[in-house]
Amino acid sequence: MTSSTMDSLSYIKDIVRLDEHEADSSEVRQLQSEIYSVAADLIELHYRIQAVRERLACLQQDGLSNDAVVHQKARVLNTFHATLSTGCPSIPTGAVRIVCISDTHNYHRKIPIAELCKQLGTDDHGRSCPLILLHAGDFTDYGTWEEISDFCDWLDDLKPLFQHIVVVPGNHDLTVDGPFYHKHWTQWHTWRVDSDRVRLRLQRSCTLLAAGLADLPVMVSQFAGTFTDAVLRVFGAAAQPRQPKTRRPMAYGYARGTPPAKAAWRRVPASADVVVTHTPAHGILDGAAEGGPARAGYQPHAHVGCEELRQRLQRLKPALHVCGHVHAGHGIVWGKHTVHVNAASIQRSGPRAPRDGVRSPATGNAHEADQTPDDAETLAMHPIIVVDMLPQR
């Protein structure tokens, strides 16, 4: 990504002011909505164009097909679980450190990332080095404006600690998927949220990749105490196998084995160093568990990841694949060519806390803000997964 392109994206984000107050008239509200829609679409289209360009480059280079495997210069050096009670290794010389989280479901403020960064961001020479934060989706429960705003405020507080923050939406982030939300919002909410406003708010706080490629410029340390420029190519996609029919429809879903499922993963370019998806690949860190996806219509211990995604990853062999979605699948698998990370941050059971304006999954009626479920939700936090990568030069 050129500096002029990054300046253009920043310009679009800066000139669009998100008014936190209710507009004075319906005409003003309509004009605001149009501004949000155009700006959000422009930013999203930029990352989609990046991905298409890379696919086209593969087709044009020596007659290679888009499915051809290209040599990846980036590679994973190390992975580990980071907690406040355990020490963290220093960043290897020439490497970039990636902090992976997912499925925080409004509990993002319980994750001690700011405290951990004091231990994580040091290289072999004891100097402070920038980090990258990846979030693989489901940062909310229902995609309400209040949930989105709080998550973005948290990201804004973290910006000084990270060189880049990349976020991929998940199925619970309902309002980020504009076409889906336009069709199904009455099944979830009692009043409609402005989906374009939501997307633009997220785009101001992070690199939001629902189906696109971002070239992340990074500074990495060298011998003799110097730094040099490098690039990390990250493709993000929110597409995932749709929920069982026993559940209400959710964002970004597709039917397994259908043309839309195959098309979703043909978008992954062969040059991607890191692929971030909400769904796991089938059979890799995707086992459902009692009290988790099993209660959502899956059989206990069933593999619920995507078959088409696994085939695509096996063909392209990216250095790193980061996902979430299946909370019980949290962990790391070192494959022959690709390191797989399920970064789900929490494991929880019991009823969700009610939220004003959200319909009850049991009755379809509106939750009231002061309602309290009979059984409180139980929560366990997974340790943060950290990956050290040697990026492209």
Image (cartoon, helix red, strand yellow):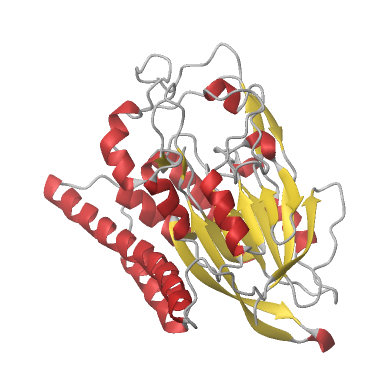
- Could you tell me which quadrant the C terminus lies in? bottom right
Residue for point 38% across, 53% down: 199
Q: Is residue 241 visible?
A: yes
Location of residue 279 (image quadrant): top right
**Outermost residue toward the left in this view:** 27
Task: Pick whichever, 343 or 354, lies toward us.
Answer: 343
User: How many numbered marks, from 0 up?
Assistant: 0
Location of residue 38 (image quadrant): bottom left
Task: Pick whichever, 98 or 193, lies toward us.
Answer: 98
- 33 vs 250, left or right, is left
24 vs 90: above or below: above
Residue for point 59% across, 45% down: 280
Where's residue 112, x and y in %? 70, 47
Where's residue 78, x and y in %? 80, 62
Where's residue 181, x and y in %? 32, 39
33 vs 303: above or below: below
Residue for point 53% across, 43% down: 139
390 vs 194: above or below: below
Location of residue 211 (image quadrant): bottom left
Residue for point 40% across, 39% down: 174
Q: Is residue 352 visible?
A: no
**Outermost residue toward the top in this view:** 374
Task: Pick whichever, 259 or 199, lies toward us.
Answer: 259
- 341 vs 306, left or right, is right
Where's residue 66, x and y in %? 47, 68
